Amino acid sequence: MAAAPETKTVHSPALTYFSMLSLLSLCPPFVILLSANATLSCLLKYSMLLGLRWYTMVHADGSVAQTWNYLKQHGLQGFIDIWPRPTAIAWKIIFVYGAFEAALQLLLPGKRVEGPISPTGNRPVYKANGMAAYFVTLVTYISLWWFEIFNPTVVYDHLGEIYSALIFGSLIFCVFLYIKGHVAPSSTDSGSSGNFIIDFYWGMELYPRIGKNFDIKVFTNCRFGMMSWAVLAVTYCIKQYELNGKVSDSMLVNTTLMLVYVTKFFWWEAGYWNTMDIAHDRAGFYICWGCLVWVPSVYTSPGMYLVNHPVNLGMQLALYILVAGVLCIYINYDCDRQRQEFRRTNGKCKIWGKAPSKIEATYTTTSGETKTSLLLTSGWWGLARHFHYVPEILAAFFWTVPALFNHFLPYFYVVFLTILLFDRAKRDDDRCRSKYGKYWKLYCNKVPYKIIPGIY
Ligand code: NDP
């Protein structure tokens, strides 16, 4: 993200595969109940986690122990009491923000960009106006504050209600995706597994659209999810300023790194349309709930913590962290850029000053056509098969470390991201192994490490 992130391991692939196997071997009603329970319990667990995280950050001094003691004392009723309810203002903020982003997506000019060939042989077409949308969004948001038309602290003050509304709103949105996938799919890259829960969870359509031009995954993943990350980072900064009359250097480092990361994302947005989230994962609960709920709440959380825990790092330490963070974001960007430049030029480019080393891998599409892809085996992609996840995780560490080590909670995202990316590397390897067969094996022999060169 950046893909945004396969933010979204709401429940493990193993569980879904288990559900699929069960579907074939056991009687259907039992399986539906089994998987439904698993999905429902994941949803409840993650929603509860979000609510408790928000409460701990904002009302319990960032201390998990304090929240735990409160829950021990007050039990379920205590939990119900602190659970933020969606309010009219929360819905209004979400609706206005969503409508604004949808309008920018539709109306701003942008270059025509073709996505990668889909499994059924389609090539989706996009309008690359992400950077313009990002710029307009931030300028509008900061101007609204500057000219005292709308104060972003309102967003911070209603954050719990907003998250709560997002949890329920996005669930309804996923039901809409499920129904659309059945009654009005946008392309042949769509289909049902025959199991309601799997269709709902993993999605039915790869490229769902409203009309010809409004791409739903670009909206959920990029323009709502990733954009909200930048908007909330700015919100936290403004809130701290309004509380203390100044912004601490820790908050400045955190906000700057997050904004550099999100700017990189929108700069490279058309590249993101070639990644797993867009090109391989269908639009269902797994990806959409993650982008609509998990990204705005979990990804932004180190900044949320810093609002009422300002740390003074001192100029030198702040600069070291900033430089290290920017370097990691740059390396992550360069890994993605290298792979895409290599594919775009059909291998006719320079990688670290030399002609790239590569494997020409053939595969068969679902419609039976034989195609060829190039696999890069030098540069960053020669160090490990998913080396780009290392700088991704380190960058997250560097924008969190300004919070120092008084509490674990700000580090939740770094831990979550590490688990997510290790799982993702495995998922991607499995997918590529089944797509490329012996050619992938050749790549694994040539580049034996999955993520960390020499170690894993
Ligand atoms: P990649 O960009 O790594 O794309 C993986 C795909 O690239 C594979 O499925 C394969 O697709 C192709 N590929 C694999 N190996 C090679 C190779 N050697 N040469 C050429 N092509 C290859 O996947 P991600 O979507 O995981 O990552 C994209 C970015 O998003 C990264 O910067 C990552 O760090 C970031 N990210 C961030 C997350 C977050 O939550 N913050 C979560 C996930 C990702 P094909 O079928 O085309 O061959």
Image (cartoon, helix red, strand yellow):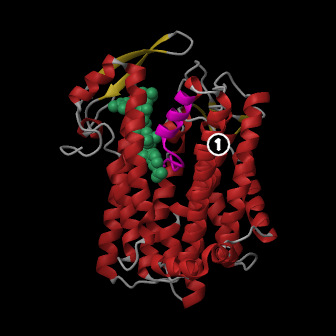
Q: Residue at x 50, y 33 (%)?
A: 17
Q: Is label 1 in a helix, a strand or a loop? A: helix
The residue most toward the left is 454
Relative to 23, residue 392 above or below? below
- Residue 321 % position (x, y): 33, 70
Quarter placement of the C terminus: top left
Front residue (pair 237, 11): 11
Q: Position of residue 451 (x, y in %)?
A: 29, 43
Residue 350 colored in magenta in the image: no
Q: In screen coordinates, is 219 left or right of 53?
A: right
Disc 1 residue lies near ligand 1 with CB under 8 A: no
Q: Write down the quadrant of residue 47 in the picture.
A: bottom right
Can residue 106 be spotted in the picture? yes
In the image, taking residue 51 as reference, residue 108 lies left or right, namely: right
Up-down relation of residue 452 to residue 317 (above or below): above
Q: Residue furthest bottom?
A: 245
**Front residue of this view, candidates 388 and 58:** 58
Instruction: Classify the position of ligand 1 by quadrant: top left, top right, bottom left or bottom right.
Output: top left
- What x and y, as percent, mark residue 331? 33, 50
Q: Is residue 46 above or below residue 375?
A: below
- Residue segment shown in magenta: 1-22
Identify residue for label 1. Answer: 36
Relative placement, left or right, of 456 versus 66 is left
- Amino acid type at circle 1 is Ala
Rendered residue at 37%/49% (across/down): 332
Q: Quadrant of residue 199?
A: top right
User: Which residue appears at 28% of the width and 23% of the height?
Assistant: 441
* Snapshot quadrant of residue 185: top right
Task: Answer yes or no: is residue 213 visible.
Answer: no
